[in-house]
Amino acid sequence: MPAKSSAYDYIIVGAGSAGCVLASRLTEDPHTRVLLLEAGGADKGLYIRIPAAFSKLYKTKLDWNYETEPEPSLHNRSLYWPRGKMLGGSSSMNAMIYARGNPLDYDHWESLGNAGWGFKDLLPYFKKSEMQQHGESAYHGGSGPLHVSDLRRVNPLTRAFLEAAEALGHPRNPDFNGAHHEGVGVYQVTQKNGRRHSCADAYLCPALTRRNLSVLTEAHAARVLVETGRARGLEYLQAGTRKTVRADREIILAGGSVNSPQLLLLSGIGPVDEVRKAGIHAVHDLPGVGKNLQDHPMVSVGYLCHEPVSMATAESIPNLLRYLLFRSGPLVSNVAEAGIFARTRPEIPVPDLQLLFGPAYYVNHGLNPRKEHCFGFGPTLLTPESRGSIKLKSANPLDPPAIRANYLSTRSDMQVIVEGVKLSRSLAHSQPFARYRGDELHPGSHVKSDEEIVEFIRNEAQTLYHPVGSCKMGSDAMAVVDHRLRVKGIEGLRVVDASVMLCITAGNTNAPTIMIAEKAADMIRAGV
Ligand SMILES: Cc1cc2nc3c(=O)[nH]c(=O)nc-3n(C[C@H](O)[C@H](O)[C@H](O)COP(=O)(O)OP(=O)(O)OC[C@H]3O[C@@H](n4cnc5c(N)ncnc54)[C@H](O)[C@@H]3O)c2cc1C
């Protein structure tokens, strides 16, 4: 799509979860001219729309297809990191779980000096974004752009999981985003009528007819242009050509937790030694850029299933027809249909374990499917102590940066997943699964002691796709943005995406990112 004019008030880099929210909200004012720049292309294709198909987007041109550097605590394995590269960004390829995390996550952010970021301040923004299937309530919005729905079909294996968890003492939670966070339940999903409802669908598409919004796709931002301490414009690459565009008011980076710190570093904003080492002129010394990276690591515990009820046959022609004609059948599943939020130690205030359940074989990101019927658990660490980094490997904006997640580098981080593996096994061996449970495929019954489970985790852990924190908000020396998300020391430049979270939330990260962008849009429109 060509740009409609050459002069803008705001340039937003990245049409992902946050970028789509910003583009839509800022252009509600017809006098505000916005350019939204996206490195990927359009979000067209059945695999984006069909909920169960999301892993088919992996390693395609719609994926940034990142790999971490060798992970020291995971036997130096490099881990695959999918990220969406298209309109909607990662919201166009994610597993659609709608989870806000724990209210105490945000109260903690506020207690670290970030006024206005406590849960009571943020709940209105969660609600503003939401079109809740069950309507407006104390915790939910009923008239926002983003459809939040119940799963249209819950697999019988998922029902067995709910019963098994209740039998083991996890209370049934009908709404993880309501009064209580802990317990077991079926996730609500960002779907509308059985189709994915990405941030492009919810926010961007309805705004595309506005004359004050221009969208450029396949335009890769290469550098923020800073003149006398103020961000004035942007260099980007399109069809092999380097182009420049300027903004009167602000440049807003919404490239996500890998790309926003990379773009700051490429622009000479970051730890001065790192920037110079890459051969880039240092513009502003900001030591926290790319530091404080956090993610949720997960491992898959999988079983063969005796009954033909799993998603192994989801892609059959009859099921495809059921989906296309009636939006029903197993293809409406988001695979990770249900889960538990739990504390592995009673003295901690917030759940440290999320145990996902799927009526499917989901090992190695679902990239090695099996023909047999299977089911699986995904114990995930929610509150990592480990911190990683994003650094430049080169000054070429098209080169991926060095990603170090530094997963499971502390004993207590590892212990949470060990407990999660044990809980998965207890669930699988409980009465509700008796008729379904076949052999344990991962880790396998030969893995018994804690040491053996740790070894399994070192060999098999992967990302749950939630990198955050690499441009953290705050007032300390390592903060990159202030509590208004303004980059410290540079005027006219903000970061608004998952990278500003100072500590990762205890849940999936799309809803929190959307909330952050809703609040940022309000601040920008209010001129603060
Ligand atoms: C496979 C997968 C499954 C997930 N499942 C869930 C889930 O079930 N529930 C949940 O809550 N969260 C989930 N997440 C996480 C969630 O989707 C992300 O936390 C959220 O989308 C992050 O939003 P963002 O705006 O920070 O980044 P993104 O949505 O990734 O957007 C960044 C955008 O910027 C563009 N961009 C980057 N660099 C440049 C550049 N230099 N120039 C121009 N454009 C650029 C990218 O192409 C992209 O469109 C999942 C993520 C993935 C990848």
Image (cartoon, rainbow, N blue to C red):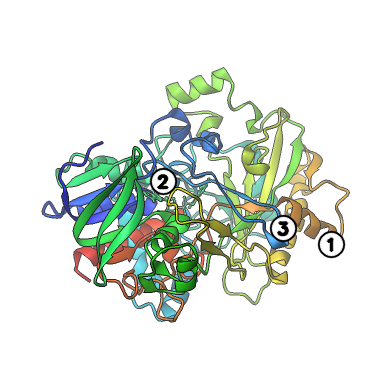
Residue 224 appears at what percent x and percent y? 31, 59
Badges 2 and 1: C-beta atoms under 8 Å apart? no
Position above or below: 110 against 458: below
Kind of residue at badge 3: Leu
CA gap between label 3 and label 2 equals 28 Å
The front one of 80 and 514 is 80
Which element is circle 2 on?
helix
Q: Residue at x 66, y 43 (%)?
A: 364
CA gap between label 3 and label 1 equals 14 Å
Residue 29 appears at what percent x and percent y? 15, 54
Q: Is residue 128 visible?
A: yes
Dot 2 beta carbon under 8 Å from ligand 1: yes
- The label nearer to you, 3 versus 1, is 3
Mark 2 neighbour density, 10 Å: few (under 14) some (14–19) many (20 or more): many
Position above or below: 324 against 54: above
Which element is circle 1 on?
helix
Q: Which residue is farthest front?
A: 279
Position above or below: 221 against 343: above
